[in-house]
Image (tube, grey):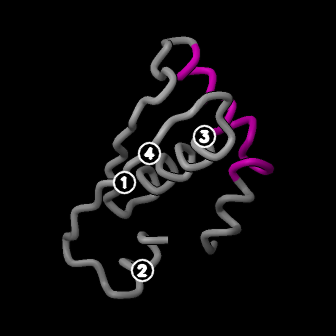
Amino acid sequence: MDTKEMERALITRYRNKLYHPFIKGLKTYEMLKENDVIGVCVSGGKDSLTLAKLFQELERHSDFEIKVKYLVMDPGFTHENLAKLKE
């Protein structure tokens, strides 16, 4: 699955299983407020990439302004995988 397909799937196919519970948790526990800066550590695994994409969608479509910063540790990624992370 390429980056665009993953982004599309988050808001279509996985909306009820991932995106809605993600948003509900953030709202229920009041985890964000206007102008927050969120750090998301990306290891390259499915879980951290999914979390990064969820926050990216939130940043794009949030009712208020937030900023997401992505932190990546390079454990020896191939050039191809590192390029995908930078997308």
Q: Is residue 59 left or right of residue 17?
A: left
Q: Residues within 10 Å of mark 1 (few under 14, many from 20)?
A: some
Mark 2: amino acid: Ala
Q: Secondary structure at mark 3?
A: helix
**Numbered badge on residue 17:** none
Sequence-earlier tag: 2 or 1? 1
Quadrant hosting residue 44: bottom left
Name the residue that disc number 1 marks.
Answer: 70
Magenta includes 13? yes
The residue drawn where x is 74% and y is 35% is: 16
Q: Secondary structure at mark 2?
A: helix
Sequence-earlier tag: 1 or 3? 3
Q: Is residue 79 left or right of residue 62?
A: left
Residue segment shown in magenta? 10-27
Name the residue that disc number 2 marks.
Answer: 83
| Circles 4 and 3 in contact, beta carbons < 8 Å | yes
Mark 3: amino acid: Leu
